[in-house]
Image: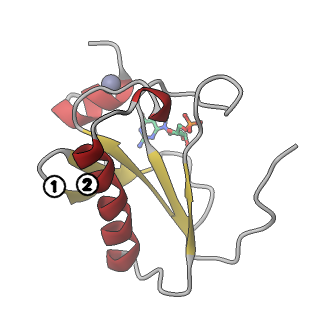
Amino acid sequence: MSCVFCRIVAGELPSERVFESERVLAFRDIRPAAPVHVLVVPKAHVESLFELVDRELAGELLVGAAEVARSQGLERGFRLIANIRHDGGQEVGHLHLHVVGGRRLGPMLAR
Ligand code: 5GP
Ligand code: ZN
């Protein structure tokens, strides 16, 4: 298995897990961009949001992100980011939502 997030889900690579549900896992980003930076991923491999068709899984990912935000004390707010495919700047080809917060974030779009 070559996908790094599939290997994290399988426990073959270490990660700091912060949330888990039946089909979703959340763990801290290895290079955090803010005090809280958590990745929320489907346990089954889906390449990106572009390929996502499972509405139940979509809901579980979104609610997972909200649960992460609550458990990480992000009541002041946070940002939810999905980088998608080449033009979206996606580096890891396994769908993930970034939950980023714990400080005031700057303007959203990098140009
Ligand atoms: P992308 O640009 O694909 O949206 O973001 C991928 C994210 O995955 C990056 O923020 C990067 O730091 C994170 N990442 C890459 N490899 C690993 C890893 O092995 N473990 C963890 N926890 N995060 C990773
Ligand atoms: Zn994968």
Residue positioned 37% across, 62% down in the render: 65
Q: Specify the farthest residue to the bottom.
A: 76
Q: Secondary structure at mark 2?
A: helix
Image quadrant assignment for residue 71: bottom left
Give ligand 2's quarter of the image: top left
In the picture, the quarter occupied by the C terminus is top right
The answer as to whether callout 1 falls within 8 Å of ligand 2 is no
Q: Are marks 1 and 2 in contact (CB under 8 Å)?
A: yes
Label 1: few (<14), some (14–19) or many (≥20) C-alpha neighbours in 10 Å: few
The three-letter amino acid code for the residue at tag 2 is Glu
Image quadrant assignment for residue 103: bottom right
Q: Which mark is residue 64?
A: none
Q: Is residue 16 visible?
A: no
The three-letter amino acid code for the residue at tag 1 is Ser
Does residue 40 appear to the left or right of 92 in the view shown?
Answer: left
Q: Is residue 53 visible?
A: yes
Residue 26 % position (x, y): 31, 52
Q: Which mark is residue 60?
A: 2
User: Which badge, 1 or 2, is on the more N-terminal residue?
Assistant: 1
Residue positioned 71% across, 70% down in the render: 105
Total numbered labels: 2
Measured Cα–Cα span from mark 1 to mark 2: 8 Å
Q: Specify the farthest residue to the left.
A: 22
User: What colouring style does the render use?
Assistant: secondary structure
Instruction: Give the residue number, with chain letter if any, for mark 1.
Output: 21
In the picture, the quarter occupied by the N terminus is top left
Q: Secondary structure at mark 1?
A: loop
Q: Specify the farthest residue to the right.
A: 111
Image quadrant assignment for residue 21: bottom left
Residue 18 % position (x, y): 28, 61
- Pair 1/2: label in front: 2
Q: Would you place residue 67 above or below residue 41 in this image?
A: below
